[in-house]
Image: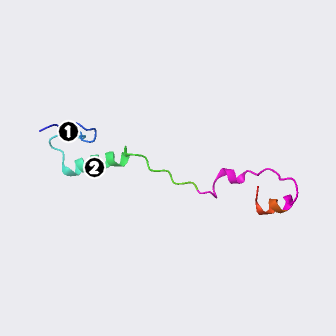
Amino acid sequence: MTKDTSPDTPTEPLLRVLTPDATPEEVAAVVAVFAALGGGAPAPEKPRSVWASPARRMRGPHVHGRGAWQASARGIR
């Protein structure tokens, strides 16, 4: 039989209780505190809406020539 040494399988326990008279409630409280601290992968970023894009606030270049005033009203660049 071979020993699995992949990084996903720990060789030692992550938490070890040294006090023999710890109650299950105390152990659960310690585990809850460590679980609340996180340490896992960060939450994925929410995709940014096109409406919230800072590029929308930038004005495009002025168009010169025939029909330029109509193109400026339609937002065509």
In-image side of 54 versus 39 (left or right): right
Q: Residue at x 53, y 54 (%)?
A: 47
Query: What range of the chain is rendered magenta?
Result: 49-69
Q: Residue at x 18, y 45 (%)?
A: 22
Residue 45: x and y, percent?
50, 51
Question: Foreground mark, 1 or 2?
Answer: 1
Between residue 69 and residue 29, name the one nearer to us: 69
Q: Residue furthest right?
A: 66
**Residue type for callout 2:** Ala
Magenta span contains residue 71: no
Q: Residue at x 59, y 57 (%)?
A: 49
**From the image, which quarter does the C terminus lie in?**
bottom right
Residue at the spot of label 2: 29
**Residue type for callout 1:** Asp
Residue at the spot of label 1: 4
Residue 76: x and y, percent?
76, 58
SS at mark 1 in the image: loop
